[in-house]
Structures are given as structure tokens and as C-alpha cells.
Image (cartoon, rainbow, N blue to C red):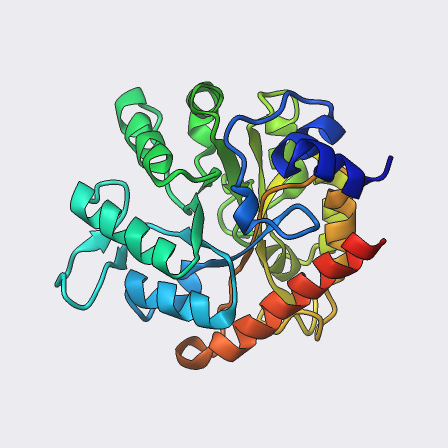
Amino acid sequence: MNRRHVFALLGAGAAGAALRGTPALAAPIPDAALTTAGFAIAVQAWSFNRFTLLEALDRAATAGVDAIEVYPGQRFSADTGDARWDHNASEDLIQRFLDEAGSKGITPVNYGVVGIPNNEGGARQIFDFAKRLGIYGITTESVDSLDLSEKLAAEYKIQVCYHNHPERPNDPNYKIWNPEWIYDQIKDRDPHMGICADIGHWATSGLNPLESIRKTADRINAFHMKDRSTIEQGSPDIPFGTGVIRLAAILDEVGRHGFAGNVSIEYEANWDHSVPDIAQCAGFLRGYAQTRQAD
């Protein structure tokens, strides 16, 4: 039985868990937002950080993505003044966001990068917000709250996705840039604990993204996906499939482990006019999914 047949019989979330040999996750990404390859094509709202959150939804829809990863601190809308979007948002703002996203066919799938404090009250506020949005995961770099995050991830059935920025040569305490280091911290923990692979930042750190994925694939639960013209610091983001990062091979590798998370396009270039570039990235991912369906 091939992977496509597993998805057909079990549904993407359960199939991914079955292939990993772990219990089926209780809060997978809704089927409507999943490609035929079993993952969601999303955009990180940070790609539109010069605009409001509601404007980001408009741009996401125009770019042809099916899902969005929201981040804390974005201004909500032109008519709400300086109101910011995060886990402190009022119920009115939350409902308005859900209504606007639903009207555009955009599924919220992830929240972050956000700090998860090492105190239960503050951490629960973030998980409650994620549950209210109905999302799959929370993206964070808070390695000082691993035990508490694991407890709440298992309780809420929400993925915790450990994200990386580039290496900080002058900060030896910043270790999460190294995928092997964070993998060692979570490899024996609850299956809801995983890695949000920012492969562009790996490249900035001089790492080969495909080789890093091969070492961590069974714990990858989300992506901040980028393509680059070179593997070095300072190389700008470019449309998927036009650079040197082997995106299809990376998706093949996590696919062998039943990846059923969000591939968030995070495009940190051409900030004011990035919709056509992001649409090209989404087209690459959709083409990949269609090819794998035919395999």
C-alpha cells in the first residue's frame, strides 16, 4: 500500500501519524486546506508585515494559498487603529478574523513565532488562543519551557513547532539554530513536539537544508519555507524552484515520515509587491503535490 492509499483510507492527519508509528493526532489541519500530498500550502503573515492582518488575508487569497500562519504584533486592520493581533486579542477581533478568513477560503493553521513563558497561566493563554482559532500548531523558540509546553501540547492536542533563526556567533546560548541540537531536545518527547524548519535560516547559517532534514525528518511538523540563490548569508529569498535549495527532495524526505503539517511560505523580499512571487511559490508547491498524487 503506497502513501496515497494510506491518506485515502485514513485521512491525512491520521495517515501521517500511522506512518510515523505514533497515535493519530486529535487536531489535524482540516482536509479542505490539505493538498493531495497531505500538507497545507500556507503563507506566513510576516511576509505581509507592512500591511494589516486583514490586508494580509486579502493578499494571501490573491496569491492562491489555502492557509495562513499568523504572528503576534501585526496591526489588525485599518479601521481598528493601533489594535494589534496576538493571544490577548478580544473576542470581537478573533471572531472578525475568523469570519474574514472563512469568507476568503483561508484556513488559519499556525501561530507564531511566539514566546511560550515557563509559567502555566501565561502558557495556557497562548494554547487557549490557538484552540479558539482551531489551529494545528504554535511556532516558538522557547526552549526554556519544554516540559510545560510538552504537557500542554499533549493536553490540547496542538503541535508545538520549534523554529530557528540563523546562528548568532556572539551568542553561544542561542542553540536552536542547529537542527540537530533541537532534535535531541525533543526526539523522545510527546509526538506533538516537533520542529518548524526555517530552511532559509539554515542556509544563512551555512547548513545544507536537505542534509539537515534527513537528520530530523521524523520530527518536522511545519516549515517556514524559502528558496535561495546561494547557501550563504545575505542571499535574498526568491520564488520556489528558481534557487539552489532542493525543495522537492526536502518534501519527499518528510513525506516518507507522513508529514501532514503546514508549509508556510515566508517571503522576506520585495515586501511591498510580493504577491506575484508568493503566488509562484504556491504554484510550485501545488505542482509538487499534483506530481506526488500521480506517483
Q: Is residue 19 left or right of residue 42?
A: right
Q: Measured along the vertical axis of the image, is residue 27 above or below residue 281?
A: above
| Quadrant of the image occupied by residue 236 | bottom right
Provide residue 59's location: percent of width, then percent of height: 41, 70
Where's residue 111, x and y in %? 40, 45
Q: Quadrant of residue 288?
A: bottom right
Decide if residue 91 is in sight here.
yes
**Up/down of 112 relative to 151, above or below:** below
What is the tally of numbered marks visible in this picture?
A: 0
Q: Nearer the viewer, residue 284 or 119?
A: 284
Residue 74 as seen in the image, left or right of residue 112: left
Residue 178, image x, y percentages: 63, 44
| For residue 15, above or below residue 264 | above
> Residue at left 73%, top 52%?
251
Quarter containing the N terminus: top right
- Comparing 111 with 59, the one in front is 59
Residue 235 appears in the rendering: no
| Residue 262: percent from left, percent from top | 56, 48
Q: What residue do we see at 68% from left, 22% from top?
A: 22
Q: Which residue occupies 68% across, 31% down?
A: 10
Q: Nearer the viewer, residue 89 or 40?
A: 40
Left or right, 252 with reference to 64: right
Identify the residue at horizontal 47%, vertical 79% (top origin).
270
